[in-house]
Amino acid sequence: MRYLVLSDIHANCDALDAVLEEAEGHYDQVVCLGDIVGYGPEPNRAVEWVREHAQMVVRGNHDKVAVGLDDVSWFNPIAEAAARWTMQELSEDNRRYLTNLPRGPVELSGFTLVHGSPLDEDGYLVGVIDAEYVVPYIEQSVTFFGHTHLQGGFTWSRHQVRHLERPAPWEPSHVVLIEETSGYLINPGSVGQPRDGDPRAGFAVYDTEGRVVTLYRRAYDIGTAQQKFRSAGLPEALAARLAVGR
Ligand code: ZN
């Protein structure tokens, strides 16, 4: 089975459309690591696409805030403004869907999905030290996580943890071979708001039979996306950051 792994779409459907165009023909099923909404201008369209196409979804912190499962006062003022806008915008159906999303980790056949960390759905795995802390608790060899918007993640064998590489700015993809003696915490990158300095949309495909995870980056029309942020009245900083991937 080949899984398209999407995370942190953040209601940016221009990025989502480009990802789907690039991924077409390379996957059989879709899984999603949460933060479908928040920040971006098309929350209903993003949720509707995920509802229709994803086989398994775990909730993200922005999904929780958008439906009142978590308190918006934890957010910085820009994220808060976008969250309040999203709350107004979501349809009743989409609100109900987000409210009922499961908390990660969720186990699938042979791998695990979480939004933040296997130990805390809202935890951040940024550095090797964060991964070292959770590795002893991980049972499956492959775990996908998001939340940091930093593509790549970690691999370890005998508890020696190191960073996984992501595609260089001039590369469309980077292949990670899944070895039986190693463990993997893999971040597919953010579709709608990358923060690793590469403004291209990030995603991954996991081929479970071939034991290969391919990390992809796909350029999209950022100018058109920014126009939508502005017409929606979302904070300018959210539109501006798309161009730099920070
Ligand atoms: Zn996010």
Image (cartoon, rainbow, N blue to C red):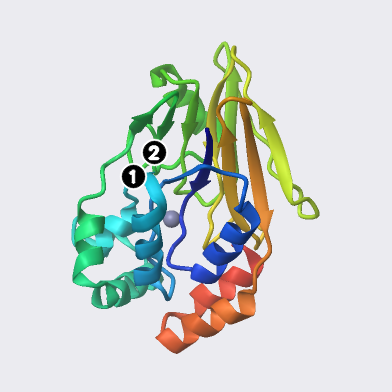
CA separation in Å, label 2 and label 1: 6 Å
Mark found first going from the N terminus, 2 or 1? 1
Residue under label 1, please give it. 58
Q: How crowded is mark 1: few (under 14 residues within 10 Å), some or many (20 or more)?
A: many
| SS at mark 1 in the image | loop
Is residue 223 something that shows in the picture? yes
Seen as rendered, the residue at the extreme right is 170
The percent coordinates of residue 88 (x first, y second) are: 24, 77
Tell me if label 2 and label 1 are in contact, CB under 8 Å. yes
Q: Is residue 165 left or right of residue 189?
A: right
Q: Nearer the viewer, residue 29 or 206?
A: 29
| SS at mark 2 in the image | loop
The percent coordinates of residue 59 (x first, y second) are: 31, 49
Q: Does label 2 point to a residue whose CB lies under 8 Å from ligand 1?
A: no
Residue under label 2, please give it. 114
Q: Is residue 136 left or right of residue 210?
A: left
> In the rendered structure, which amino acid carries the disc numbered 1?
Val
Is residue 196 something that shows in the picture? no
The quadrant holding residue 156 is top right
Q: Nearer the viewer, residue 224 or 74?
A: 224
Residue at screen point 47% across, 50% down: 7
> In the rendered structure, which amino acid carries the disc numbered 2?
Val
The quadrant holding residue 245 is bottom right
Eyeballing the image, is 66 above or below 61?
below
Q: Is residue 92 left or right of residue 238?
A: left
